[in-house]
Image: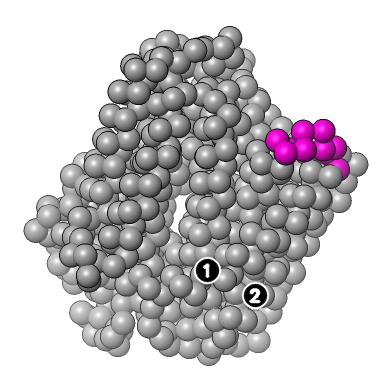
């Protein structure tokens, strides 16, 4: 990322920022004191005591997903490529339906605290250990590392804050309430941060639309192809339409259905009904980022073409140029708070998942009789260590040409083996432990090899788009799982038998809970809305 134009901050803006920081840390600590009598138990600390209802789950899922990367890098992609990268937001809705239908019921019925725990019950202990390590790795290097670095670069560009100092301050403030309060503090602060995030982003969008002359003014100012979301390889070589439909389901299944950082909110659900509806709620909210984060970049392109904005030399400056030129005093502070909300919510969620994975999947195996109070303490120590590791890794992210495309590439090389063992594990009864272990180990090795081929592509000549690479890796992983499952059949236990659907349609047959919302109707509505959006913007 290049240098961004600095903001001229007024006292009202600074007051808003400090009010936000104090309020969000205070809310996280209050969440801890509210349940201090039970917070020493592992269930209360790691899973909020199984008390979460679907609105809180939905808001927390969205807030953990959205980070500073989205606000800044999606605006950058919107300026360069128009709405094309909005696919990463809208396609998520379909994977959230998959989470609601096929995975959430098993997660809640088995009452697992972590997804590696689920994998052990379906396959074997070896699968649990492997996934626990991979999940900790992804939380540190993807969720936290990328968020800290992007936030630091943005804050330096906007306010002149040193990158190292920014990383230390934001990580410390987030770590305070995450370490003390556990998952309950995380989801309560995330719910508030979601509202601030959407509100601050909406300010930029509305101001931009007014300046460009509304939708009609935008449509006449930019290239028509930039208003479409599905492109040919000739129009957008980095993201043709077929790579979206082949590649995104692979990384989406891992991210939304099998990543501890995200799914932990569902694991803390009060019951199966809340666990099923909870993921569908953010599916509707995921419609907004295309308009809140991607569209402002396209609006900037239109304003530059209209001569209403100065030429943007570095596309990474897009978001700060919009803030500088469009927002009045006071609102700049709101948007700055939104940037901090996006950063802190993602980091807090990932830190909490790291502590859960290490404490319950690794440490408790070594010391199975460890009391809950000790586990909670271990979780807090690991949260601190994870934060330090992410702070050390984050400066290396400058290697990537585009931060958003960099994080997508890293996910593409991690996801295939995990996606394969999860999706075939719940849909195919013959999927065996031997096949799953081989798939996780060989698939991870192949992903690492492809990562290095891509990292040193100037020397290796590697030119396979990451979204297609993840599809090819998934096919290889699926073949490995299938072959070894036939050669070494799985010996099901009474518990593992219950963690496989007899058929995909079986997930649709049961009505959960009495009265209220039916998850099937909510999912159908979400599916129809997304199809209509794709038809309109295709």
Give the residue number, with chain letter if any, for mark 1: 393
Q: Residue at the spot x=49%, y=37% of the render?
A: 258
**Residue 506 in the image: x percent, y percent?**
43, 12
Q: Tell me: residue 381, above or below residue 71.
A: above
Q: Provide the residue span drawn in magenta.
A: 364-373
Tell me which corner region of the image, top left, top right, bottom left or bottom right, holds residue 194.
Answer: bottom right
Residue 180 visible in the snapshot: yes
* Whether residue 335 can be seen here: no
Disc 2 designates what residue? 168
| Residue 103 location (% of width, % of height) | 49, 27
Q: Residue at x 39, y 17 (%)?
A: 488
Residue 391 relative to residue 25: left or right = left
On the rendered structure, is 180 left or right of 418? right
Mark 1 or mark 2: name the one nearer the start of the chain. 2
**Which of the 4 quarters of the picture holds residue 485?**
top left
* Mark 1: few/some/many CA within 10 Å (<14, 14-19, 20+): some
Q: Is residue 506 magenta?
A: no
Which is in the foreground here, disc 1 or disc 2? 1
* Residue 365 on the magenta span: yes
Is 15 positioned to the left or the right of 89 in the image?
right
Give the SS element for disc 2.
Answer: helix
Vertical arrangement, residue 498 with respect to residue 222, above or below = above
Q: Residues within 10 Å of mark 2 (few under 14, many from 20)?
A: some
Q: x%, y% of residue 433?
A: 47, 24
Q: In this view, which residue lies farthest toward the front?
A: 487
Quarter of the picture containing the N terminus is: bottom left
Residue in front for this viewpoint, 508 or 513: 508
In percent of width and height, residue 185 lies at 73, 51
């Amino acid at each position: 990322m290049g240098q961004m134009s600095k903001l001229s901050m007024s006292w009202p803006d600074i007051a808003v920022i400090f009010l936000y920081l104090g309020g969000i840390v205070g809310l996280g600590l209050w969440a801890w004191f509210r349940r201090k009598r039970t917070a020493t138990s592992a269930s209360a600390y790691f899973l909020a005591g199984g008390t979460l209802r679907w609105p809180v789950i939905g808001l927390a899922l969205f807030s953990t997903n959205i980070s500073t990367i989205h606000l800044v890098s999606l605006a950058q992609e919107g300026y360069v490529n128009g709405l094309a990268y909005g696919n990463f937001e809208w396609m998520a809705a379909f994977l959230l339906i998959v989470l609601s239908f096929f995975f959430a019921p098993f997660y809640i019925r088995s009452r697992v605290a972590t997804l590696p725990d689920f994998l052990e019950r379906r396959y074997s202990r070896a699968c649990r250990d492997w996934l626990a390590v991979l999940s900790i790795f992804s939380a540190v290097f993807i969720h936290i590392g990328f968020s800290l670095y992007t936030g630091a670069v943005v804050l330096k560009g906007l306010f002149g804050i040193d990158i190292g100092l920014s990383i230390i301050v934001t990580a410390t403030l987030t770590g305070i309430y995450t370490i003390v309060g556990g998952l309950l503090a995380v989801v309560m602060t995330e719910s508030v941060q979601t509202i601030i995030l959407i509100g601050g982003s909406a300010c930029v969008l509305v101001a931009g639309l007014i300046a460009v002359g509304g939708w009609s003014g935008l449509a006449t100012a930019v290239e028509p192809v930039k208003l479409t979301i599905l492109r040919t390889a000739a129009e957008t070589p980095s993201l043709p339409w077929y790579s979206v439909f082949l590649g995104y389901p692979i990384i989406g299944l891992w991210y939304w259905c099998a990543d501890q950082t995200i799914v932990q909110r569902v694991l803390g659900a009060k019951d199966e009904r809340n666990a099923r509806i909870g993921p569908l709620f953010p599916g509707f909210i995921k419609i907004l980022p295309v308009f809140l984060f991607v569209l402002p970049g396209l609006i900037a392109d239109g304003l530059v073409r209209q001569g209403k904005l100065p030429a943007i030399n570095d596309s990474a400056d897009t978001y700060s140029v919009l803030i500088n030129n469009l927002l009045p005093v006071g609102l700049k502070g709101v948007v700055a708070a939104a940037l901090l909300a996006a950063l802190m919510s993602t980091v807090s969620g990932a830190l909490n998942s790291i502590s859960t994975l290490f404490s319950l999947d690794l440490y408790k195996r070594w010391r199975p009789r460890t009391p809950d109070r000790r586990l909670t303490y271990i979780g807090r120590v690991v949260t601190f260590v994870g934060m330090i590791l992410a702070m050390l890794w984050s400066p290396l992210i400058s290697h990537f040409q585009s931060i958003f495309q960099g994080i997508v590439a890293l996910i593409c090389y991690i996801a295939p083996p995990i996606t394969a063992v999860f999706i075939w594990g719940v849909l195919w009864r013959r999927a065996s432990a031997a096949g799953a272990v081989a798939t996780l180990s060989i698939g991870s090795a192949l992903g690492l090899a492809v990562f290095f081929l891509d990292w040193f592509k100037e020397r290796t000549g590697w030119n396979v788009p990451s979204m297609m690479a993840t599809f090819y890796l998934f096919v290889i992983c699926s073949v490995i799982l299938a072959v070894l499952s036939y050669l070494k059949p799985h010996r099901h236990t009474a518990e593992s038998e219950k963690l496989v659907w007899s058929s995909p349609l079986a997930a649709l047959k049961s009505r959960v809970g009495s009265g209220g919302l039916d998850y099937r109707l909510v999912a159908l509505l979400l599916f129809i809305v997304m199809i209509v959006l794709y038809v309109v913007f295709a």
